[in-house]
Image (cartoon, grey):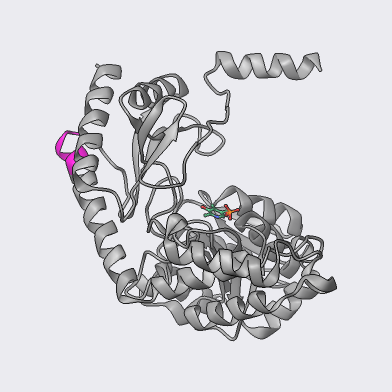
């Protein structure tokens, strides 16, 4: 045991130690911590649906109708009517032939890349893609070519370099909205490249689904190329307020995943209450209520980011509800997060390996349900705290 104790001591000395913080309330815009009630500025519950009465009621009804658990994986006895209904709804939402549920976004990305690609194939992956994509690339044993973040021109160079002795399948994989920077992938350029080089395009829209695009269909709808994406991966645990994930794609892809994807095959299926509340969330996203939640989110985002910028802070390339404030090294980052917490603002400091070394940041995330006045106060407190630490 002592070697781990020593390793943890080193992490602590480097301000790199991670510990859990217990939230003692439901996930509203304000939550209860040991420190008291704080403004929640680090949740992916962008539309506030995690505590929406319609989702709660749908989950409660499903528990009564279908029970608490499924008792098996999808391929054994755990594939139930609510799973099938949600998959049909997700396919219609993304405009694909079919969809398949996974137990989490992590399981979806690892299972999708492992299930569809192998040693003869090449995965072209954005340098800032989510860790679950990185792990999926490893599990697939495909050759993985990392291209510089968001750089379609650099990707094109790599594609043409690989073309000489090409064999197997090619796939370009990218986050839709990048989770730590809040910028958006250049999907229109990636569509052009995937066509020119006969590759597939996979978009992980964990942070775009529900919030971007006129109908909340995500980054590809926002950029006008929804039909061009071959593999739509998305999660149900962020804007959709519950848990789990999906892949929407052609039937042949979904059938292949059912037969090959280990994270799908070897895991108990989601409890029926999850697809039930996810369907309620999808109904809201596609309703007038969803539209007005998105409007509120974008107006909150503008208010908050502009106030930080007017105070002299850069929010990088972010154009979305994820607003980073660069802080550099771990020590000042964690000091800032702690002092903001004392002031009643819960915002996370982000350190390696989540972001590259030297790129630590406070990552603020906005919700449709935040009160504008609270966001103004939070922005002012962040400006004050930054001025205090980086005097
Ligand atoms: C959160 C996230 C995931 C993982 O999804 P979970 O359902 O939380 O496992 C995958 N990709 C991206 C880009 C994410 O932000």
The residue lying toward the viewer, choosing from 227 and 57, is: 57
Residue occupying the point 73% across, 60% down: 142
Tell whether position 310 is magenta. yes
- Whether residue 246 is visible to the viewer of this picture, yes or no, is no
Residue 202 spot, x, y in % from top left: 56, 68
The residue lying toward the viewer, choosing from 3 and 138, is: 3
Give the side of residue 84 with respect to residue 235, left or right: right
Query: Where on the picture, by quarter, is residue 310?
Result: top left
Query: Where on the picture, by quarter, is residue 90?
Result: bottom right
Outermost residue to the left:
310
Residue 264 spot, x, y in % from top left: 75, 65
- Whether residue 300 is visible to the viewer of this picture, yes or no, is yes
Query: Looking at the rendering, in which quadrant would you find the N terminus?
Result: top right
Residue occupying the point 64% across, 68% down: 64
Tell whether position 342 is magenta. no
Query: Where on the picture, by quarter, is residue 73?
Result: bottom right
Residue 290 spot, x, y in % from top left: 34, 69
Residue 98 spot, x, y in % from top left: 61, 82
User: Measured along the vertical axis of the image, is residue 150 above or below residue 356?
Assistant: below
User: Measured along the vertical axis of the image, is residue 149 above or below residue 275?
Assistant: above
Which span of residues is magenta-colored? 307-312
Ligand 1's quadrant: bottom right
Q: Main secondary structure of the magenta part?
A: helix
The residue lying toward the viewer, choosing from 377 and 232, is: 377
The residue lying toward the viewer, choosing from 120 and 207, is: 207
């Amino acid at each position: 045991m002592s070697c781990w104790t020593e390793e943890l001591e080193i992490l602590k000395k480097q301000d790199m130690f991670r510990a859990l913080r217990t939230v003692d309330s439901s996930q509203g815009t304000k939550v209860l911590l040991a420190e008291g009630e704080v403004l929640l500025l680090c949740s992916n519950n962008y539309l506030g649906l995690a505590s929406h009465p319609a989702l709660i009621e749908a989950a409660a009804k499903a528990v009564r109708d279908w029970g608490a658990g499924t008792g098996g994986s999808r391929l054994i006895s755990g594939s139930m009517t609510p799973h099938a209904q949600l998959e049909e709804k997700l396919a219609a939402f993304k405009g694909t032939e079919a969809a398949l549920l996974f137990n989490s976004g992590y399981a979806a990305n690892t299972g999708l890349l492992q299930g569809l690609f192998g040693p003869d194939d090449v995965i072209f992956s954005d340098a800032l893609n989510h860790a679950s994509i990185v792990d999926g690339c490893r599990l697939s044993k495909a050759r993985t070519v990392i291209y510089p973040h968001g750089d379609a021109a650099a990707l094109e160079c790599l594609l043409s370099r690989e073309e000489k002795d090409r064999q197997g399948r090619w796939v370009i994989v990218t986050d839709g909205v990048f989770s730590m920077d809040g910028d958006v992938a250049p999907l229109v350029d990636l569509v052009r490249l995937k066509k020119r080089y006969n590759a597939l395009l996979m978009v992980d829209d964990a942070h775009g689904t529900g919030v971007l695009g006129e109908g909340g269909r995500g980054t590809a709808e926002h950029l006008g190329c929804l039909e061009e994406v071959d593999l739509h991966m998305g999660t149900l645990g962020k804007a959709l307020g519950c848990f789990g994930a999906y892949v929407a794609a052609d039937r042949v892809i979904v059938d292949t995943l059912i037969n090959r994807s280990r994270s799908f095959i070897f895991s108990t299926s989601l409890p029926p209450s999850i697809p039930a509340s996810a369907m309620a969330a999808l109904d809201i996203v596609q309703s007038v209520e969803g539209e007005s939640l998105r409007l509120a989110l974008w107006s909150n985002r503008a208010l908050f980011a502009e106030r930080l910028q007017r105070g002299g802070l850069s929010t990088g390339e972010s154009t979305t509800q994820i607003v980073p404030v660069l802080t550099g090294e771990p020590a000042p980052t964690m000091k800032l997060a702690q002092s903001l917490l004392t002031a009643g603002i819960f915002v996370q400091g982000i350190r390696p390996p989540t972001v590259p070394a030297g790129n630590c940041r406070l990552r603020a995330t906005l919700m449709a349900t935040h009160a504008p006045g609270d966001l103004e106060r939070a922005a002012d407190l962040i400006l004050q705290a930054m001025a205090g630490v980086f005097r």
